[in-house]
Amino acid sequence: DRLRADAAAADGAKTDADARLEEEENRLAVAQSAADKSAAVAAAAGERFRAAASRLADLHAVRSSLLKAREKLARRLSELRERHGAGAARLAILNELDERGEGVGVALREVLRRARAATAPPWSLVRGTVAELLDCDLDDAALLEVALGERASLVVIDDFDALLPHLERHSAEYRSRVGYFSRRDLTAGGAADSAAGLRGFKLIDTRGRGPGQPWASGGRQSSEVFGGPESFATPPRHGGLTPPARQDLNGLPGIVGPAVDLVTPDNAFPELAERLLGDTWVVESLTDAAKLSGGAGRGRRFVTRGGELLEAGGVLVVGPPRGEAALLTRTAERRRLRAELDQTAAALAGGAERRDALGEKLTEVEAALDGATREKEEAAAALAAADRDRDRTG
């Protein structure tokens, strides 16, 4: 009996032990599950924190890049504004010179003023001066000015049909010399008989009258509208400004090229360049000009790279260019300045748009930075809580 009682007690003890063991195992399983869950939460919190930190770093890099771009753009806009201001100031000076008529005679200024406001011939037929109508690069303007000589200030008019009757009545009113150039080649025929021999060239005085003096016949006195003598007469060499067929001198020693090539190909009045410069060649030096003038280039005009002009009749003109008083140079500079001002204005407008776009982008990035900073702080707090929970359950 005693043995049976001991066996029964042992079985009970074993059952109790098994129950306690199962209970402990269950507790350990629950604890491991909690630990695993805490570890998973901590890992997720760590990943979230790292992602938030990485995004914040990327946004800081973007912000830094945008700030550098804005600073660079600001410097560029400042340079453009300075350049635009300098160009505008220079253009204002050139316009002031034009308004004052620098390099232009009193009578020519009056002719151009009347042409700008005219609605009827002859002034409505005026197209401007040669200097205004011939396009060239600014780098070539001084040389072209020398090649043209006084021809640069000729007034270009469609034809003389209405001009000649006007001059017959008012020529004595000119106070300074004015040259007219007919776009219609008078050597081609069809001109009025009274224009015979003019050939589109400058009108020059041959009557020996002084300013305000009457005509030889006792005709009208000067009305001082233009004031002074100016009538028509002697044609220049080669029958005026329509030279004979151009002899090709290209390839000869010292020849740079025809002066016509100094005029831009897209010039609006191509016939002007040919008729005004068809007899003129650009050469390297005066020595070359002299040799050519006495040989293959006889009867031609030669202008050197240094700005000397050798006329066909043996007239040599030397000396520095006229600077700001040079009409064609001033006109070419004005054209270039206007083109540059248009370009800088467009660049400034584009830069302003780019600056505004950068400002908007920076605002967006700043807002994103605020959000990313909060996200990183929240992720850091969640990671700290997860680490504490993991330590507690570990």
Image (cartoon, rainbow, N blue to C red):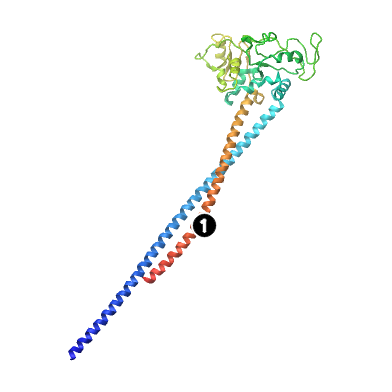
Which quadrant is home to the C terminus? bottom left
In the foreground, 335 or 94: 335
Residue 368: x percent and y percent? 50, 54
Residue 258: x percent and y percent? 55, 16
Which quadrant is home to the N terminus? bottom left
In this view, 96 is above or below 4: above
> Which amino acid type is marked by label 1?
Asp
Q: Residues within 10 Å of mark 1 (few under 14, many from 20)?
A: few
**Residue 94 sits in which quadrant?**
top right
Q: Is residue 214 left or right of residue 46?
A: right
Res. 88 in view: yes
Residue beneath disc 1: 370
Res. 230 in view: no
In the foreground, 286 or 232: 232
Q: Which residue reaches farthest front?
A: 120
Please name the residue shown 77% across and 20% down the image: 225
Please name the residue shown 61% across and 36% down the image: 84
Q: Is residue 334 left or right of residue 48?
A: right
Residue 208: x percent and y percent? 76, 10
In this view, 94 is above or below 314: below
